[in-house]
Image: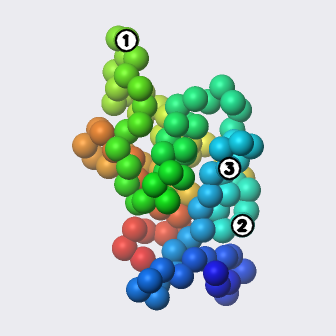
Amino acid sequence: MARSKTGHSHVTSKNGQTKPEVKYDVELFELWVNGALVKRLDSRATNQILILSAFQELNWARRIDDPLVPANGADAKARLRSTIHCLNGCQHPPAIHFFADGTGHGIRWELAGISPSE
């Protein structure tokens, strides 16, 4: 693990590039980015918890399939959009941005203020 000029910790990948350190603590319902606590969830935020748990299980892959369980009569795409909106809210400091992948069936993330190509 290396530290950047800004003091954030990063993990160096096999190809020598650094990637941000993102961790969701499933026991404490806490989202950490580069060593900073950015969001603490209420245990009732089940949809947000499902998405963060899926990212954590998949080692913070850049994209995951929608893990939300279908609900009777609910519009799956609208529910996904709503959950993504909630994930992006109440981050202190705002450090990670979640967004739909354009298919209505997946979720992506990037560090706040950084485009995916950087």
User: In the image, what residue occupies the spot 56% across and 71% down?
Assistant: 20
Quadrant of image for the C terminus: bottom left
- Disc 2, SS: loop
Would you place residue 17 above or below residue 94 in this image? below
Residue 26 lies, in percent from the top left, at: 65, 44
Q: Amino acid at mark 2?
A: Gly
> Which residue is disc 1 drawn over?
72
Q: Is residue 94 visible?
A: no
User: In the image, what residue occupies the spot 59% across and 62% down?
Assistant: 22
Q: Amino acid at mark 1?
A: Asn
Which mark is drawn over residue 35? 2
| Relative side of 32 to 17, left or right | right
Residue 17 lies, in percent from the top left, at: 46, 84
Q: Quadrant of residue 62?
A: bottom left
For marks 1 and 3, the one nearer the N-term is: 3
How many angstroms separate mark 2 from mark 1 (CA)? 39 Å
Q: Kindly indicate whether the residue at mark 3 contacts the one at mark 1 (C-beta within 8 angstroms).
A: no
> Which residue is disc 3 drawn over?
25
Q: Amino acid at mark 3?
A: Asp
Q: Residues within 10 Å of mark 3 (few under 14, many from 20)?
A: few
How many angstroms separate mark 2 from mark 3 (CA)? 12 Å
For marks 2 and 3, the one nearer the N-term is: 3
Quadrant of image for the N terminus: bottom right
- Disc 3, SS: strand
Task: In this rendered view, identify the residue nearer to me: 2 or 7.
Answer: 2
| Nearer to us: label 1 or label 3 | 3
- Disc 1, SS: loop
User: In the image, what residue occupies the spot 53% across and 82% down?
Assistant: 12
Which residue lies most toward the left here?
103
Number of callouts in the render? 3
Task: In this rendered view, identify the residue nearer to me: 71 or 79.
Answer: 71
Which residue lies most toward the top here?
73
